[in-house]
Image: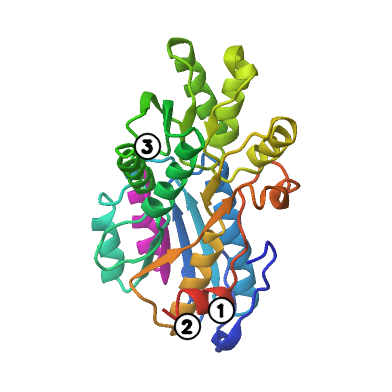
Amino acid sequence: MSWTATMRAAGLAAAIGTAMAAAGPAAAQDAPVVALSNSFFGNTWRQQMVTSFEEAAGQAKDQGLIGDYIVMNGDGTVVQQQAHMAELILRGVDAIVINAASETALNGVIEEACAAGITVISFDSIASAPCNYQLNFDFKGYKQAQARAALDLVDGQGNAIVVRGVAGSAPDAAMYEAQMEVLKDYPGITVVAEVYGQATAAIAQSGIANVLPSLPQVDVVLAQGGSDDIGIAQAFLQYGGPYAEKMPVIEGGGGTDFVKWWAEENAKSGYQTVSMNTTPGIGGAVLWLAAAMLNGAEAPKQMIMPVATVDASNLQQYADLPSGMIISPTYSLDWVEQNLLSN
């Protein structure tokens, strides 16, 4: 997968009607409308995900696969997302792709959407309503692998901070559970603090800075990803003290700023860690998935996306990427057909 994968319509570009304005009413039957209900917009990962959705939607609209698209970004609360979903049902959209504020609390309104004939796909932070399709990551599997790699780098000994993600989200719960399971196999590791980072550099940095003065020396940080990784590193750098000589092993979450810092530290001191992250390009993938389904493709109820991994073997490959981003390929319709719809 590359950063600039070609968007190909394949055989799905069956006759679609004239496009409609995004702010207007839902499209006619021959020009379906896809809506994104995004529960939270307050970190780099979610913002990049929305951009990915919008870019793919523009391509799909130009190719006649959809009539138009709608984006509704929430404040992280179930109440606001319920209101957004209710509005989309009233507008009669053809498909809703939802990054949900809760795995269960949106199920009622999702079932209402399904009953109205709307195709619903939850992704990343999924919902458990039986009628909805799920496009997910293997949060538990990849986070277990990353935790083991990080803990092995400190020989399974020392003090750890656990930095959680977006409070109340399904990914936070799954990744935290995975980390706790792995820690059972490392009795030499003591968790000395837990903070919420909201997958955001500034919040993670503040959370770490607030607890560091009261802690013994920290050897490893288990995090959840997004742009929290560089915020965590900055908190230790600003604190100084023992960390001026030796930084803890900090799990990377795919932030390009963190990878750049890591590459510089590696060149100076041989610093090593591992970065694994869910890819915000899923926003584009879920758009292509919805477009394909609206044009007759059949999909399994549950689908899994890959994650991006950076380690010692490929660190330099990612060291020159632009700042302020999350590592992610651009997924195409072709990729969706081959990797999601063919299963």
Tell me, yes or no, whether the highlighted magenta stretch contains residue 89: yes
Q: Residues within 10 Å of mark 3 (few under 14, many from 20)?
A: some
Q: CA distance from mark 2 to mark 1?
A: 7 Å
- The reply to whether discs 2 and 1 touch (Cβ–Cβ < 8 Å) is yes
What kind of colouring is applied to the model shown? rainbow
The tag earlier along the polypeptide, 2 or 1, is: 1
| Magenta stretch, residue numbers | 80-100
Residue 102 on image: x %, y %: 31, 47
Q: Amino acid at mark 2?
A: Asn
Asked if marks 1 and 3 touch (Cβ < 8 Å), the reply is: no
Q: Is residue 330 above or below residue 189?
A: below
Please determine whether, in this image, residue 98 is positioned above or below residue 235: below
115 relative position to 42: left or right: left
1 or 3: tag closer to the N-terminus:
1
Give the quadrant of the N terminus. Answer: bottom right
Q: Is residue 221 left or right of residue 178?
A: right
Residue 92: say if magenta.
Answer: yes
Q: Which label number is shown at residue 65?
A: 1
Q: Position of residue 68 (x, y in %)?
A: 55, 69
| Element carrying mark 3 | loop
Q: Identify which amino acid the numbered label 3 is placed on.
A: Ala
- Label 1 amino acid? Leu
Which residue is at 64% across, 17% downward?
Answer: 244
| Residue named by callout 3 | 167
SS at mark 1?
A: loop
Q: Are marks 3 and 2 in contact (CB under 8 Å)?
A: no
Left-right relation of 295 to 284: left
Q: Quadrant of residue 294?
A: bottom left
Whether 76 is drawn above or below 68: the answer is above
Identify the residue under disc 2.
295
Left or right of 226: which side holds 88?
left
Camera-side residue of 7 and 320: 320
